[in-house]
Image: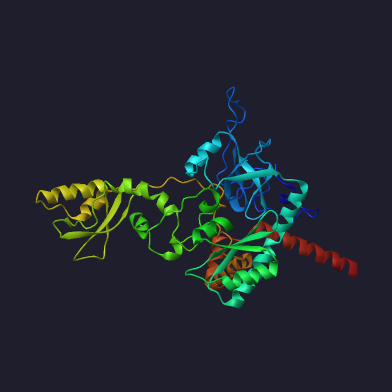
Amino acid sequence: MSCSTCSTNKNGVPNGCKSNGNCATGTCSSGNKLAVFDWLSNMTLPSGEAPFNIYEVRFKNGRKHFYKNTENISLSMGDAIAVEANPGHDIGVISLSGELVKVQMKKRKVTADDEEIKKIFRKATQKDIDIWHASREKELETQRKGREIISRLALKMKLSDVEYQGDGKKATFYYTADSRVDFRQLIRDLASTFSIRVEMKQVGMRQEAARLGGVGSCGRELCCSTWLTDFRKVNTAAARYQQLSLNPLKLAGQCGKLKCCLNFELDTYLDALQDFPKQSVTLKTEKGEATFIKMDIFKKLLWYTYKEDSFKWFKLSLNQVQEIIELNKNNELASPLEEYESEIIDEPEINFENVVGQDSLTRFDVPKKSRNKNRRNKKNKKAVKAKVTVTTPEQKQQKNTNNPPNTKKNNRKKQRNNRNKNVRNNQKK
């Protein structure tokens, strides 16, 4: 199920999500970031126990806050409600209710008697929803004009997003900046241009990418815009442990910072590296000392080369390297690396069998051979053979001797000719 704005128009063209993930249908990923399934919804509370009166409310771009139901209004998940704001009220959608809200509050370290938990006024009426949608439609134009004002004031900041309050009386401008910005004049210009109350909120590069969303180099949606909420620091040491090239263009994400996924895989690499020797250890062999070049962690392969002859690299297994190190600890020299490398058997990779031969993308790049050229070549070869096989008079005599003429046929021809002559002579007489 989806809202009407996500469907196609009469011409079959998709409209796209006009609500930016806040249609309250439970299908939009940007609005339901880390949505919790209420598996306690079908269970009744024990007798005499009142339901929990704090609800989790979702706003634009997955922003969530907790609000208290002091008026004991009958509410359920997916309802659009009017909540307390400063000033006026805001419109949000209930994303979670019941006992599971206590678990979410514990994760975010929010207590039930916290002063930041504001009140729920009422269920949103049709008039509230109309004003809410009208103010949401002005956000794109407000963002465009706000950027024009910032460029006119020559401020070193980037306006990334604008969020209107549900009643349309206030707007929050999210921006990023490398240094401190004096935006007092900017607030005056924005307030006079749009006739609203302005609030400026600075966000980091990662928070900006989380709000705007996008697709990463892996082909999937950004982790920060779908499920990641804890933005931890990422160091280049994580890339070194994973044997990755320190290329900032490949290691940086959409936000311009190092990719968060480098931290996810780091523990797996660290566990695998515990069995590997240090890269500073040299192997002492009968041919000389060998130094480390590179390694393949999951295939457990290492490459070494001689200090004196560093042109060739030798591929060794982890067990072979550990064996050489044990020999060196006992003050023994190992055999040359060539002997160890010859013991490694490269197993062929099992791949699918190409039966039809249509898996190659470059199969049409090679031009076909024209048939006319083949025909011309055949004719030329025949002509050359004909020129070469020229018979001489002596060869003709040999043919006649080898194939004597048929005498019976010649006698029959002579008899026919004589008969014809006699008939002609009788006619003349």
Quarter containing the N terminus: top right
Give above or below for 95 relative to 185.
above
Q: Which residue is drawn at the image coordinates 71% and 61% (left, top)?
A: 138
Residue 19 in the image, given as x and y percentages of width and height: 68, 53
**Residue 120, above or below 381:** above
Q: Can residue 14 be seen in this view?
A: no
In the drawing, does residue 329 fall left or right of residue 425? left
Q: Position of residue 402 (x, y in %)?
A: 54, 61
Q: Quadrant of residue 144?
A: bottom right
At horizontal 21% and vertical 47% (from top left) the residue drawn is 322
Identify which residue, 89 or 248, lies in the foreground.
89
Which corner quadrant holds the C terminus?
bottom right
Give the residue at the far top of this rendering: 47
Which one is nearer the viewer's eye here, 74 or 215?
Answer: 74
Image location (x, y in percent) of residue 335 = 16, 52
414 displayed left or right of 293:
right
Dividing the picture into quadrants, the one containing residue 303 is: bottom left
